Amino acid sequence: MKLEFRDSFVDKLNQQVAYIAEDKPSVARKFKAKLIQSLKLLTSQPYKNRRSIYFEDDQIRDFIFKGYAIVNKIDERRQMISVLALINHERNIGVNLQSE
């Protein structure tokens, strides 16, 4: 399977990285690199993570990374995993998932 990052995810990731970088730029870079590296592992085991708590759909999964929920959708037909959102409940960072 291939991996695609939706704009909604990229925007929220960049916001979070900028927030972390205010205090610790090197930690922010490592956070982003490790997250992307971990997400790439989904291509070999797309159903490894829990079914999303936000949707009643087995194709939508929540990948948990350091307290963040990364919502992704598996499309078997296209052989694609779409990374939709980064949700951080502490800072109220997320997206309106109903619009995806």
Image (tube, rainbow, N blue to C red):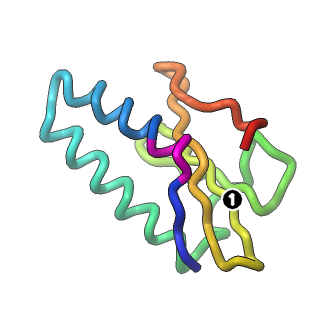
Which x, y percent locates residue 71?
A: 62, 48
Instruction: State which quarter of the image contains the C terminus.
Output: top right
Instruction: Please tell me whether the stretch drawn in magenta is mainly helix, strand or loop.
Output: helix
**Residue stretch in magenta:** 6-10
Q: Quadrant of residue 51?
A: bottom right
Does residue 87 appear to the left or right of 29 in the view shown? right
Q: Nearer the viewer, residue 97 or 88?
A: 97
> Would you identify the image quadrant in which residue 11 lies?
top left
Badge 1: few (under 14), some or many (20 or more) residues near its Cα, within 10 Å?
A: many
Question: Magenta stretch: residue 86 in it?
Answer: no
Q: Front-most of 98 and 27?
A: 98
| Image quadrant where one finds the N terminus | bottom right
Query: What is the tally of numbered marks visible in this picture?
Result: 1
Q: Which residue is mark 1?
A: 73
Left/right placement of residue 94 relative to residue 100 reads left
Residue lying at 71% horizontally and 37% vertically, measured from the top left: 97
- Report x, y in % for residue 60: 73, 56
